[in-house]
Image (cartoon, rainbow, N blue to C red):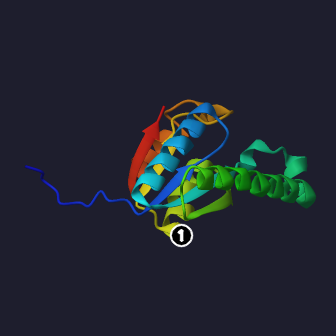
């Protein structure tokens, strides 16, 4: 007998994307799950501002350019999700430390039922589980599925 009566019928799924192999696997799983359950799929990518140097961060055109490139790139993810059978897809581009931004800003804003993430980020210190993915798994107020 189950101890909890929590409903696992997820209607709004948030997936973190960053072009890493694990994030692509998470994205593919999220498409499959959202298509099968008719859930809304929210794609989130974070422009990590700590990866820019001092001069780049002071150059508003540089930061704006990186952000607009990422927004355009997210459209390819949206199209792939629609081709995969997801009817309701939207995307969000945030800035900052990926784990903290997703947990503290994105989740409260979009109110998903499930967060799906890859276990590794594409570069930097955050590429090993134990950093961004571990932070989200530990501090997320919603269920987290880590794909590897």
Task: State the residue at coordinates (67%, 59%).
Answer: 94
Crowding near pointer 1: few (<14 within 10 Å), some, many (20+)?
few
Task: State the residue at coordinates (55%, 30%).
Answer: 128
Using the rendered image of the protein, determine whether residue 35 is visible from the camera's viewpoint: yes
Front-lying residue, 29 or 146: 29
Task: State the residue at coordinates (45%, 40%).
Answer: 146
Residue 98, x across and y down, in percent: 61, 49
Front-lying residue, 62 or 119: 119
79 relative to 105, above or below: above
Q: Is residue 35 left or right of residue 101?
A: left
Front-lying residue, 110 or 51: 110
76 relative to 19, above or below: below
Residue 123, x across and y down, in percent: 68, 33
Residue 78, x across and y down, in percent: 65, 55
Q: Disc count in the image?
A: 1
Q: Quadrant of residue 132?
A: top right
Q: Is residue 148 left or right of residue 93?
A: left
Front-lying residue, 96 or 23: 23
Task: State the residue at coordinates (66%, 34%).
Answer: 122
Regarding mark 1 in the picture, which secondary structure is present there? helix
Residue 103, x across and y down, in percent: 50, 57
Which residue does the numbered mark 1 point to in the structure image? 109
Using the rendered image of the protein, determine whether residue 96 is visible from the camera's viewpoint: no
Q: Is residue 146 left or right of residue 2?
A: right
């Amino acid at each position: 007998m189950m101890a909890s009566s929590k409903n696992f019928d997820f209607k709004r799924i948030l997936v973190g994307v960053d072009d890493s192999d694990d994030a692509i696997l998470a994205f593919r799983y999220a498409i499959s799950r959202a298509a099968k359950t008719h859930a809304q799929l929210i794609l989130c990518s974070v422009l990590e501002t700590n990866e820019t140097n001092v001069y780049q961060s002071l150059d508003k055109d540089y930061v704006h350019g990186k952000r607009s490139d990422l927004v355009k790139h997210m459209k390819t993810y949206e199209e792939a999700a629609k081709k995969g059978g997801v009817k309701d897809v939207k995307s969000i581009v945030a800035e900052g430390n990926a784990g903290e931004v997703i947990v503290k800003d994105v989740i409260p804003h979009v109110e998903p039922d499930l967060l799906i993430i890859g276990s590794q980020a594409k570069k930097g210190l955050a590429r090993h589980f134990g950093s961004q993915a571990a932070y989200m798994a530990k501090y997320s107020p919603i269920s987290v599925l880590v794909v590897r």
